[in-house]
Each structure stands twice: as structure tokens, then as C-alpha cells.
Image (cartoon, rainbow, N blue to C red):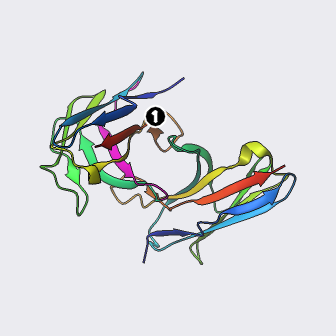
Amino acid sequence: GAVVSQHPSRVICKSGTSVKIECRSLDFQATTMFWYRQFPKQSLMLMATSNEGSKATYEQGVEKDKFLINHASLTLSTLTVTSAHPEDSSFYICSARDQSSNQPQHFGDGTRLSIL
Amino acid sequence: RKEVEQDPGPFNVPEGATVAFNCTYSNSASQSFFWYRQDCRKEPKLLMSVYSSGNEDGRFTAQLNRASQYISLLIRDSKLSDSATYLCVVNTGTGRRALTFGSGTRLQVQP
């Protein structure tokens, strides 16, 4: 079964709307979670590293005021795309590492965001 | 130069064929290596880890050449269900535990 739950799986909304995506680790605690973005026919690009109880670490070129990350508990990280525009339309995926697992990371199912 | 480079393909092969994918990485400090499979509009799923000694899992064989910074994946006896995008993934292990993904190689197995 899924070890990382991501919600919602699909969002379609108007330009200017803020969208919140949740990423939950199931059955394990994750002090660190990762947020990736994937545009069509491109690779997954790391946007930011979410750290429980502290500020997220953003990759170069990713606006921290645009993509707000909150990691308030050991099992939940949220990504909020503020005032989304059509160019923010993409596939957003979170992941987390279970220290007791031999898998490098467990991925959520992803959120397909479409901004009209 | 990209950190992880792959031939995007597509590779169109008949069922039963053997196909090989290659990948190069630029960071010599990279410590762990993986092949992931991604189906259209889905999250990536771990296919196998890659070790210096080479490793095999059924029809899949992965090889790592640290000197050349080169990783390969061999698929024997291709099945229709193998059609997907195969992502070469590297972890530098230098305090960052995020993964760096190649852009993927698309495989289409045809009947």
C-alpha cells in the first residue's frame, strides 16, 4: 500500500487562486520531505526540501514567497502555490524517506495542477 | 551540462527484444544510483538500485562504472508492460538526501 499520501491528485482552477497540496507520510515519521515539479516531457526537478520544525530549503530559481512550504509535524508537509498562473501548471510530486526502509524515497501519487 | 544525462529516445522495440539504456552523471561525489520507472502521468517507482558490482533482477540488469561515471540498464525479453519512461537517478549523499533525476528514456514495446 501507499506509504506517502498526496492530496489532491488533480486541481483545475482560475488564475490568481492559491492552491494547497498536502503530503503525508503513512506509518513512518519524516523529518525531511521533498517537493518536485515535472513539466511535460521533462525530468523531475527538485523545488525545495521541507524540514520539520524549520524553514524549507529552496532550490535556485524557486521563489519561496510563491511556493510556501509548511512542515508542521513529522508526518505532514504542505506546499501552497500562491496566486497561481498558467505557467505554474505542472505535475507536483512530494517524497519522503523512511529510515527503516531500503528504498531511497517514497513518492506520493502526485498532483496535476492546471491553471486556466 | 546537466547533472544526469540520458538519451530521451523513444526506443521502439518488438516484444522479446533486448534493449539497453545508458546514463552519465557529472558529480564524481555521487554515492548512490537508481533506475526508476515512470508511467504516463504517474509518480516514479523504484525499479532497482545500481551497485558497482552490477546487479540483476529477473529480466533487468544494472551496471555502474564509477570511473566513467556511467550507468546502464539492460532489459531482456521485453514485454508490452515494460513500455514506460526509465529515469536514471543519482544521490550525491553530501548532506542532501534529495535525488537528482535524469530526463528519462522512453521505451515503447510493440507487439
- Which sits in the foreground, A12 or B5? A12
Percent of width and height locating residue A100: 47, 32
The chain to which mark 1 is attached is A
> In the rendered view, would you say B32 is above or below A7?
below
Q: Amino acid at mark 1?
A: Asp
Q: Secondary structure at mark 1?
A: loop
Residue B110 in magenta stretch: no
> In the rendered view, would you say A71 is above or below B77?
above
> In the rendered view, would you say A93 is above or below B11?
above
Query: Which segment is the magenta one?
Result: A28-41
Which residue is identified by label 1? A109
> In the rendered view, would you say B29 is above or below A11?
below
Tell me where residue A7 sits by quadrant: top left
Residue drawn at 50 percent across, 62 percent down? B103
Residue drawn at 73 percent across, 64 percent down? B20
Percent of width and height locating residue A22: 30, 30
Left or right: residue B104 versus residue A78 is right
Percent of width and height locating residue A13: 26, 36
Residue drawn at 59 percent across, 77 percent down? B67
Residue drawn at 23 percent across, 38 percent down? A14
Tell me where residue A113 sits by quadrant: top left
Left or right: residue B8 versus residue B58 is left
Left or right: residue B56 versus residue A8 is right
